[in-house]
Image: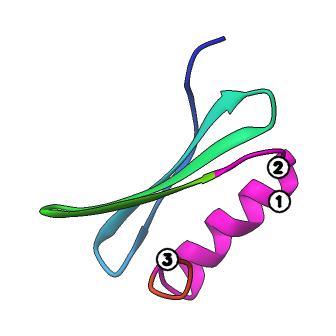
Amino acid sequence: MGITLVAKGYEGGVSVYLWSFGNYTYELAVDGGENKESSIFNDTSYEEALNKFNLATEIGTRELF
């Protein structure tokens, strides 16, 4: 199974991506140009991963990393 882009959003001019790797594995990636961060969530439902993405785009990414 391949990698699928689930959602893309912005927080303070920074791109935030939610990727699915299948089998309940997701990556929340933040691309701030030179500064890039990501977190992998294993055994996570789609709803949980989407909630984390929504938090990142609503309250900011600093609280998540």
Residue at the spot 71% in from the left edge and 38% down from the top edge: 25
**Structural distance between the alpha carbons of marks 1 and 2:** 6 Å
Which part of the image, by quadrant, shows the N terminus? top right
Q: Nearer the viewer, mark 1 or mark 3?
A: 3
**In the rendered image, the vertical position of residue 38 relative to residue 57, given as above or below:** above
Three-letter amino acid code at the position of disc 3: Phe
Secondary element at tag 2? loop
Image spot of residue 48 (x, y percent): 83, 59
**First-in-chain label (3 vs 2):** 2
Labelled disc at residue 44:
2
Secondary structure beneath dot 1 equals helix
Q: Could you give the CA–CA distance between mark 1 and mark 3, rounded to whole angstroms?
A: 16 Å
Question: Is residue 56 on the magenta stretch?
Answer: yes
Overall secondary structure of the magenta section: helix
**Residue 22 quadrant:** top right
Q: Position of residue 21 (x, y in %)?
A: 64, 29
Decide: few, some or many residues near mark 3? Use Cα within 10 Å; few <14, some 14-19, many ≥20. few
Extreme residue in the left direction: 34
Which residues fall within the magenta stretch?
41-61
Mark 2 residue type: Thr
Q: Are marks 1 and 2 in contact (CB under 8 Å)?
A: yes
What amino acid type is highlighted by mark number 1? Glu
Label 1–label 3 contact, CB within 8 A: no
The picture quadrant where one finds residue 50 is: bottom right
Image position of 63 (left or right of 43): left
Is 46 on the left-hand or right-hand side of 63?
Answer: right
Q: Which residue is mark 3?
A: 65
- Quarter of the view holding residue 10: bottom left
| 42, 30: nearer the viewer | 42
Q: Residues within 10 Å of mark 2 (few under 14, many from 20)?
A: some
Question: Which residue carries the number 1 mark?
Answer: 48
Against 42, is 35 above or below? below
